Every structure is written in structure tokens, then in C-alpha cells.
Image: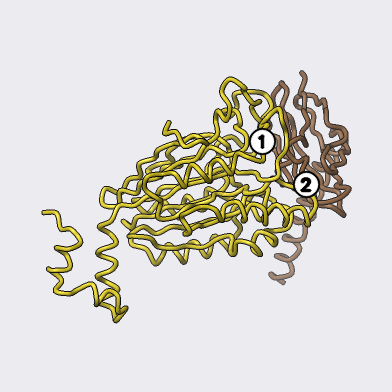
Chain colours: A brown, B yellow
Amino acid sequence: MKSIKSGLLIYSALAAFTLISMRGYLVAAENERVIQITAKKFEYSPKEITLKKGVPVVLEFTSLDRLHGFNCPGLGIRMDIRPGKVNRLQFVPDKVGTFPFHCDNFCGSGHEGMRGMITVTE
Amino acid sequence: MKIDRRDFLKLAGIGSAVFASGLGGWDHWAKRALAAEDDFFFVQLSDTHWGFTGPAVNPDSAGTLKKAVEAVNNLKIQPDFIMFTGDLTHVTDDDKDRRRRLSEFQDIISKLKAKNMRFMPGEHDAGLDEGEAFKKFFGKTHYAFDHKGVHFIVLDNVSDSTSTIGEDQLEWLSADLKQQDKNSRIVVFTHRPLFDLYPDWDWYTRDGAKAIEMLIPYSNVTIFYGHIHQEHHKNTGHIAHHAAKGLMFPLPAPGSVPVKNPIPWDANQPYRGLGFRNVEAKVKETRYAISEFSVRGEKL
């Protein structure tokens, strides 16, 4: 009997946690902005992105050819952009300014020029 | 009291014939002891980027490496060995071109008088094919060797296009270091800097901190690298990192301009910012005296 009670208690706790988590996700999903970015040799499209400080954003990267990278040291974000899948990077810009980004996975003769800029406004 | 080679042979009660015989552990020990007495030179050549064309950056792109070869051959004392720290060739997306450039590079440097040459790739040589073409011409991309009392470690942080050393190689490094005393003289060669020199320009190694952490317990570690096409010196703790000039085009100082582009050719100062270095290993003093040379061999 004791073990059944314990089981119910754990189940209830798990269910409550799941609901809270789902609610949190839904809240975030409602507010966040999704930006789709394609990467290919040797450019991003779009390569200039404007965001609002404090507004959650998801960058959805798709590679059209090979492994690329996205590295924006000024905002402290990076990710590998692997071909054949959508690569999602979720973050909240926490400062205003212009922040260059670049491909940091060596991708060929135009690698050095594979760059872009994120502008974060108030 | 200073003991020279001849005195050592007398004290040890052995003649040079024994050393030539290659017999037994005593011979090995004596050779090591003698080797540790000797200072020596090596030359670091870096970022030769054979195959690059761009008259505004280097109108003598086909002649610069050849001039450097001649300058090294004209050194009064020939180095014990020459180390090439990567980007032997300029990147091409065509595998046949890559192999042709590697072959041409190999032919040019075969004119060097010093025949003991060591190689490692840069991302331009190895980043697109995981080092396959490089290996065909120059062998392994990471390895270790000993020379006159110094343990040299060559780390590959370019064949993986994600700018990482990788867990397998880090395990190899760990095993290699375990064989060394904590006060061994250790020199590490890499292409990219192991520390975060300037990540905005990709001047770092993503897992470089793991390698540095492994090296920290060793008291005498010096790192020579390339990649940034300029002389640069920095310490992380007691570990010294020395970047070398390139031999095709110089790059701006880290973060000094918004965008990293080669510095244009200056007709009034041709070959400015290009060159090679001579490193004198003062083994007993555990220090390395670096002399910079221009492409034409003038000591700077």
C-alpha cells in the first residue's frame, strides 16, 4: 500500500513538472522570433540580421552543401551547421550593438569571406 | 665545472667507437647525456601558401618561397632541422590542384641544404580532405620526436575542419606526455594558436585549452606556431607561445582592423612583414633564442 502511495506521489510530481515545463516552453515559443538562415559556400543568407534586446530568438540554420559554422563571439554564441538537418540556436540578445559573425569550420577557398553581422537594437 | 664532449668520453671511459657500435643501454644513456650538452639551431618556416596569387598582396608570389630557401641555404650555420608549421599551400577546392601544389612545394623545398625537415599541415593543406593529400606527400600530421635532449611534439589542429585537436589526438598527447619527466624540455609545434588569441578572426583552437591543461604540469614547455602571419609572443602561465611570420602575405595585428584581410604589398618596402626565424635551443638553460630573418636573409 505504501509503495502504491509513493508511486502515485512520484507520478503526480512528474506530471506537474511536465505541465510546468510545457507551459514554460509555450510561453517562450509564443514570444520568440524565428529566423531562417541558409549557409552555403561561401555565404549566409541573410547575412545581416537585426534583433531586439531581450526578445528571445531562434536562428534556424540550414546548410545547402557541407559543414559550416556560425560563430558570433560578441554575443557568445556558436554552432555547427550540419547539412541534412535544421540546426536550431535559441538565445536572448542581452546587449545592444553590432556583432560580426563568421564561419568557423574551414569550408574552402572563400571561407575567409563567409561573414555576416547581427545588429541588436533597444 | 664544465665538461665538454671529449672530457665526457674520457670520464666515461669509453671511446667514440662504442658510440658508433650502437650497443646496449649504456650507449643509449651516454648518447642522451651527451646530447643534452649540445645547443642547436632549428629554423621555422611557416605559411608559405604556395599557389596563392594576388599581385596587390604579393606580386612575387611565385618567387618568395624560392628566395626564402636561398636565404636559409645561405645561413652561416645550417640548422639541425627545419620545421614547417603549416599552410604549405594555399587552399584550393580542387583535389587535383591541391596535390599539384603540394608536389610543387615539395620540389622547391628539396633545394634546401638542410635535409632534416619536419612538416605539419595548416587548414589550407588539410582542412578540406582531413589531411589525406598532405599525408601522401609528408606523412603523419601529428607525431613526436626527440632531438639533443629536447622532446618535440607536433599537434594537428587543422585536419578536422572544426579547428579542433580531437579526443583521439588528445589521448595520444596525454600518453606521450606521461613518458616525460615533469622537468623535461618540451617544444610543441602547432599551426593554430592553442590559446584564444582572437576568436573573432578564428585565431584559436576550439579544444586548445585541453592541450594546454595537459602541458601545464611540465615546467619547460615552449610552443611555436603559425597561422597568423606575424610575429607574436604570449605566455599562458609559464608556457610561452611564439607565432612566426608567413612567407606569402602578412596579416594585421589581432583586432586592429574590423575585417581581417592580407596587408597590401608596399613597393617601397617589398616583402615587409614576411620572413622566417632561426631558433637556438639553449638546452642547459632551457631557453630558446629567436632570431628573425627577412625573406632575403637579412637578420632583423
Question: Where does the image place residue A87, in percent across and percent down from the top left?
Answer: 82, 47
The one nearer the camera, B28 or A59, is: B28
Q: Amino acid at mark 2?
A: His
The one nearer the camera, A74 or A57, is: A74
Q: Residue at x 73, y 45 (%)?
A: A79
Total numbered badges shown on the rendered structure: 2
Question: Where does the image place residue B56, in percent across and percent down from the top left?
Answer: 71, 27
Q: Which mark is residue A76?
A: 1
Q: Residue at x 51, y 44 (%)?
A: B70
The answer to which image quadrant residue B181 occupies is: bottom left
Q: Amino acid at mark 1?
A: Gly
Q: Residue at x 83, y 37 (%)?
A: A43
- Assign a secondary structure to mark 1: loop
Q: Is residue B86 left or right of residue A111?
A: left
Residue on which disc 2 sits: A68
- Assign a secondary structure to mark 2: strand
Image vertical order of residue B121 relative to residue A52, above or below: below
Q: Quadrant of the N terminus of chain B?
A: bottom left
Crowding around mark 1 (Cα neighbors within 10 Å: few <14, some 14 to 19, many 20+) is: few
Q: CA distance from mark 1 to mark 2?
A: 18 Å
Q: Quadrant of the C terminus of chain B?
A: top left
The one nearer the camera, B213 or A34, is: B213
Image vertical order of residue B104 relative to residue B60, above or below: below
Q: Which mark is residue B113?
A: none
Q: Chain of mark 2?
A: A
Q: Chain of mark 1?
A: A
The one nearer the camera, B248 or B261, is: B248
